Image: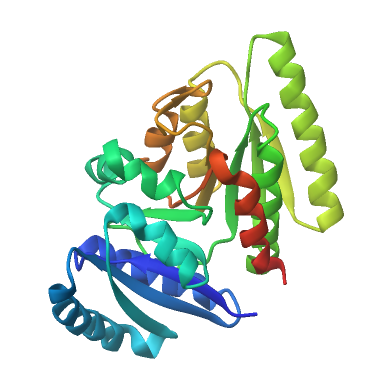
Amino acid sequence: MKKTIVVPVDFSEVTENAIQHALNFCQQTEESEIVLLHIVSGQSAIEGAESKLQMLQNKYASKGNIRYSAMVGELVDMGKFAQDMGGSLIFMGTHGLKGFQYLVGSRAIKVVSETSIPFIIVQGGVELGEVIDEIVVPLDFSSEEKVILSATASLAKVLNARIHIIGAHYSDELLKKRVDLNLSFAKRYLKEKGVDFVVVRASDQKEYQEEILDYSRMVDAKLIAIINHHEDGVSNLLGKNFDQNIITNKNKIPVLMFTGKKVNDNRDIFMMFSN
């Protein structure tokens, strides 16, 4: 089954970085196509946008199956447009911290929270050409973590990648036991699925997000998978600004982001990669 990867474009350098990341991803998957999506405010801008999109398509045509679409709407319509196109994944470029504020701050948080399609968010200036072979998955006590684990396992099977589970540390005994249960489930599940994996526990020496990033650097991770449990996208029990700090990490590791609001839909759509 063909997988459709949607790349929102604003014709910036970061946009082209996202396109190249998507192309690299498609080389690891079979029968994948990329749709370049540009959203304009009015019908009169369609023709000009399509001309620019065609230039981008021509630039990268030799590297993959690419088509394009210019749609009238707003930024918050991105997820709906991607769903209408049959998209199973969105590659989004961002300008570090400033770009992240644009992506998930104020009204733009709806771009992520209102769609059931997962995002891979990439920063500019990232060296390209490497395959995704090491994926880090933070795991805490919530039930949604089992869903992101399921989706990430499906992706790892397709990419022939190894998953690194890093369990959260809590001083509260009840939360600690719940994390332990999720880690036990993760081990059984990944073993049953035949996915190569490593399971480690975070210590209490640093903030959890710092330990995740330190570990990701150590194993040369090519992707970090997280779930946004809250609509504000910036604060939860894992620490203030957890999502923001992971996505804007200084090593510029791409981040696969799911939303807790529609996490069951995330699982259903992303399971396309296991077919």
Measured from the top left, where is residue 125 in percent x and y? 27, 57
Residue 233 as seen in the image, left or right of residue 31: left
Measured from the top left, where is residue 78 in percent x and y? 36, 59
Name the residue: 44% across, 34% down: 231
Q: Is residue 71 above or below residue 217?
A: below
Measured from the top left, where is residue 115 in percent x and y? 48, 52
Q: Which one is in front, 112 or 99?
A: 112
How many numbered marks does the figure carry?
0
Q: Is residue 89 above or below residue 165?
A: below
Measured from the top left, where is residue 232 in percent x and y? 40, 31
Name the residue: 44% across, 29% down: 242
Name the residue: 35% across, 57% down: 77
Q: Which one is in front, 205 or 135?
A: 135
- Quarter of the N terminus within the rendering: bottom right
Q: Quadrant of residue 187?
A: top right
- Quarter of the C terminus within the rendering: bottom right
Q: Quadrant of residue 59?
A: bottom left
Residue 185 as seen in the image, left or right of residue 247: right
